[in-house]
């Protein structure tokens, strides 16, 4: 029978334990680890099965190969590839339960072909069958066939963890996920089945699909002749937007948009919808247009050697070419000695270069 093979994994585990904080994912649940491990086991089986169709099939090969099929050599090959070297939980699980895996391989495989069931659920007890949860694998609310009546997720489903409470899908609510959440109405219901469908967008609660089915209106809608209709927030006595914005009504809501920069207050988008023109703009041809302050009979930029630059809504005064701002004046730009020498160097070099070219010719 299978000899215990040398524990090659131990030094690795020591190493991993030392930097355990970095590689351990505390959220990774043991059942998930076990299921992944079994997945890898099946992959290993597949990979090693190719060895059965290696080449010729002499009687000798047949005998050797069929021996290999259920051999310890094959098992060792599979086990060595069960976990990524950085996967601490997986390596630990294999290390702790290698004997059971061997036992299954040599004794139980035929009778219990489902390795998740035999290993993860029944032997090392980290998983439960589907629809069951917790240390004792109790059935989820609604039964293990249809946990949470098919309308939610059962806490701990399929693992030895959780408390079996239902986390309902968005349409459903209540401990059994048989009630409809706000915004959904019940189209079918008995003790074990419920189907909830979304209300019309105008309803907060409803008992039918159209806006006539609303029991309460959603915010932004109001009851009128049995249905919920959009409230025009923009028409309110006290407008909801600020002075430099206009109001845009939408189904169930509204938004405030910035007026054009040429406006001081506006009723809609663009320079044509201003209530008044902003400073620096004048009303001209049905809209507020930018004023060219530089183009007035009176000079606006009055210092020596400066020019006026028209900007939208205003103007600036800047020094003209060859002058720079210094202590509130525009003064001629003086080159430092270094700059002048450098400039000379460039022109000398350029001259030398062109001479060199002539020599080459
Ligand atoms: C409840 O409704 C479902 C689906 O319509 C049906 O299959 C089931 O038999 C019903 N159960 C009872 C107790 O009436
Ligand atoms: C100008 O060129 C001379 C020699 O060609 C060099 O020594 C000097 O450092 C250069 N000056 C500058 C500012 O680049
Ligand atoms: C400033 O001048 C007015 C009037 O000529 C123009 O209509 C503007 O476009 C101009 N503004 C800018 C930023 O050039």
Image (cartoon, rainbow, N blue to C red):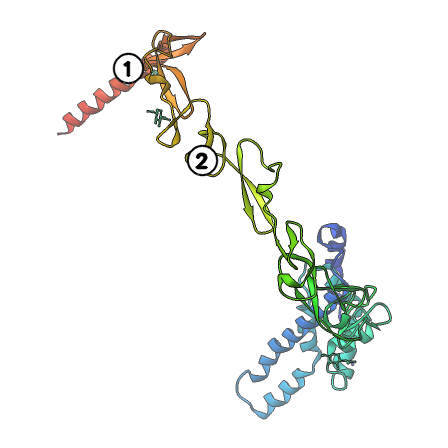
Q: Are marks 1 and 2 in contact (CB under 8 Å)?
A: no
Q: Quadrant of residue 133?
A: bottom right
Q: Residue lying farthest bottom?
A: 59
List x then y, in percent, for residue 187.
69, 71
The residue where tag 1 is placed is 344
Mark 1 residue's CB less than 8 Å from ligand 2? yes
Determine whether the residue tagged by mark 2 lies in a helix, strand or loop. helix
- Residue 3 showing in the rendered view: no
- Residue 117 showing in the rendered view: yes
For residue 279, above or below residue 220: above
List x then y, in percent, for residue 233.
60, 44
List x then y, in percent, for residue 237.
62, 38
Quarter of the figure that contains the C terminus = top left
| Rendered image: mark on residue 273 | 2
Q: Quadrant of ligand 2?
A: top left
Q: Quadrant of residue 287?
A: top left
Sort mark 1 into few (<14), some (14-19) or many (20+) by Cα contacts within 10 Å.
Answer: few
The residue nearer to you, when weighing 78 against 224, is: 224
């Amino acid at each position: 029978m299978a000899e215990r093979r040398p524990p090659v994994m131990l030094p690795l585990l020591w190493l991993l334990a030392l930097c355990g904080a970095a590689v351990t994912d505390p959220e990774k649940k043991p059942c998930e680890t076990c299921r992944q491990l079994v997945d890898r086991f099946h992959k290993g089986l597949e990979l090693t099965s190719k060895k059965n169709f290696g080449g010729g099939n002499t009687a000798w090969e047949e005998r050797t190969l069929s021996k290999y099929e259920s051999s310890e050599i094959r098992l060792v090959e599979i086990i060595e590839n069960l976990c990524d070297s950085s996967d601490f939980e997986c390596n630990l699980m294999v290390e702790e339960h290698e004997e059971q895996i061997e036992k299954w391989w040599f004794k139980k495989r035929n009778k219990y072909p489902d390795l998740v069931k035999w290993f993860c659920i029944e032997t090392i007890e980290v998983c439960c069958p589907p629809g069951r949860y917790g240390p004792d694998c109790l059935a989820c609310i609604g039964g293990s066939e249809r946990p949470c009546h098919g309308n939610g997720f059962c806490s701990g489903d399929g693992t030895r963890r959780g408390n079996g409470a239902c986390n309902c899908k968005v349409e459903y609510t209540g401990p059994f996920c048989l009630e409809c959440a706000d915004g959904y109405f019940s189209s079918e219901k008995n003790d074990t089945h419920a189907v909830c469908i979304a209300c019309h967008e105008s309803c907060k609660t409803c008992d039918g699909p159209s806006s006539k089915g609303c029991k309460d209106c959603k915010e932004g809608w109001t009851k009128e002749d049995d249905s919920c209709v959009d409230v025009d927030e923009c028409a309110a006595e006290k407008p909801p937007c600020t002075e430099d914005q206009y109001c845009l009504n939408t189904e169930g809501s509204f938004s405030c948009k910035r007026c054009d920069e040429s406006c001081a207050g506006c009723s809609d988008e663009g320079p044509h919808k201003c209530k008044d023109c902003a400073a620096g703009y004048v009303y001209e041809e049905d809209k507020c247009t930018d004023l060219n302050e530089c183009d007035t009979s009176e000079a606006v930029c009055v210092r020596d050697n400066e020019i006026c630059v028209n900007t939208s809504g205003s103007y600036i005064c800047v020094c003209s070419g060859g002058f720079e701002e210094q202590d509130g004046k525009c003064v001629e730009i003086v080159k430092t000695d270094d700059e002048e020498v450098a400039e000379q160097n460039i022109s000398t070099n350029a001259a030398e270069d062109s001479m060199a070219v002539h020599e080459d010719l």
